[in-house]
Image (cartoon, grey):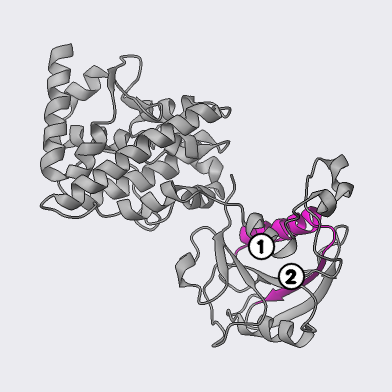
Amino acid sequence: MTQDIQKLISASVIRLRTKSPFFATLALFARFINAPHYQTAATDGKDIFYNPEFFLSLPPAQLDGVLLHEVLHAALLHVPRRGVRDAILWNFAADIVINGIIMQQGGFELPPGGLRDEKLEHLSVEEIYEILSKDGEKYKQMWKDGLADLLEGSEEGEGEEDDSMSGARKAALEAHWRNALQQAAVIARSSKQGTIPAGIERELNNVTTPQIDWRSYLWRYLVQTPNDFTGFDRRFVGRGLYLEALQGESVIVYVAIDTSGSIGGEELRLFLSEVSGILRSYPHLKCELYYVDADAYGPYELSPDSAFPKPQGGGGTSFIPFFDKVEERWDGHAQAVCVYLTDGYGCFPDKAPSLPVLWVVTPGGMSLEQFPFGESVRLLSV
């Protein structure tokens, strides 16, 4: 039976080559290991494990789809990218991305019951995970009830890697698959097809561009980088926060929280939590909070111990009133920055404001490239 399985896998890789040189090249970077203890198929981030009886039961088009499914989970670094996130929800999110990519190609099939969500599959795995987390217990129950059991063995395998994956192991996986992706891209572009498959370019950006906490962006506006130890703020040592000194005691952060009708209760709670994070992380700051829909309500001056005022809003979305109010209040001298927590859908000013702007955008919100000014970053957990 081992010989038969090897022939099946070799034939599948050959078919991949005729359908997509890009995918076929990636498959050459994976080892396929006979593992009867898995129900279907699995990956540990590098190797592919399969149940031989399961592979033998599949028609060729479905075998190609399953093989590609596992290869893409590994190649797109879904195992190391998970970090400490819930394994079941992460695998749901990763399957939505992977199955979307596969089914967009044409010529591939997946076994019945494949997880597909065309409304979400254009997003990153991290974004989809955040969206699914809002109703996490429902998805976990679906898993327990067997209502979403495509490649159940795969999900078990992808979840085996524990939260303490060593830095060396993670670096080795990233180096292996980045090399594979580069070679696959070169071969794809030199082939008759001449292109990378649909959906892959977007996910490649998520692999090659590290996810950065939005507070890291904020940090650049608030601190100086000292060239000796004179700028070190020793007041934070006792709390384990080795921070550089702020440039002054007059740093102002103008924070806008989108309270328009498109923002639900969960997003609003997340926004308020992030503002609390600003205040705890940077106690030197003077923080002015605004709730904004089509109007701006505030300012509310906050400190780390302040209670949040009751949110106001619920109407349409315009970013203009907030920036108008900031322009009125800023004296033109104090160091200051605007932070806007939003889904990004609304009316922008015709002219960029005088102060730097950081947009912190909800999962599933507007594409970061569409913001007309400032810097934008996705609000994701890690």
Q: Which mark is residue 311?
A: 2
Q: Position of residue 124 (x, y in %)?
A: 43, 52
Q: Position of residue 216 (x, y in %)?
A: 65, 55
- Residue 141 position (above or below residue 121): above
Return the residue found at the far top.
1
Q: Which residue is mark 1?
A: 268
Q: Which residues are magenta?
A: 264-292
User: Which image quadrant for residue 62?
Assistant: top left
Which residue: 33% across, 21% down?
39
Is 281 situated left or right of 188 in this image? right
Instruction: Tell me the crowding category of disc 1: few under 14, some 14 to 19, or many 20 or more residues within 10 angstroms, Cα based.
Output: some
Q: Amino acid at mark 1?
A: Leu
- Residue 86 position (above or below residue 285): above
Which residue: 56% across, 50% down?
134
Q: Amino acid at mark 2?
A: Pro
- Residue 60 position (above or below residue 244): above
User: Which image quadrant for residue 240?
Assistant: top right
Say what secondary structure mark 1 lies in.
helix
CA distance separating discs 2 and 1: 9 Å
Which residue: 78% across, 78% down?
298
Q: Please identify the quadrant where the C terminus is shown.
A: top right
Say what secondary structure mark 2 lies in.
loop
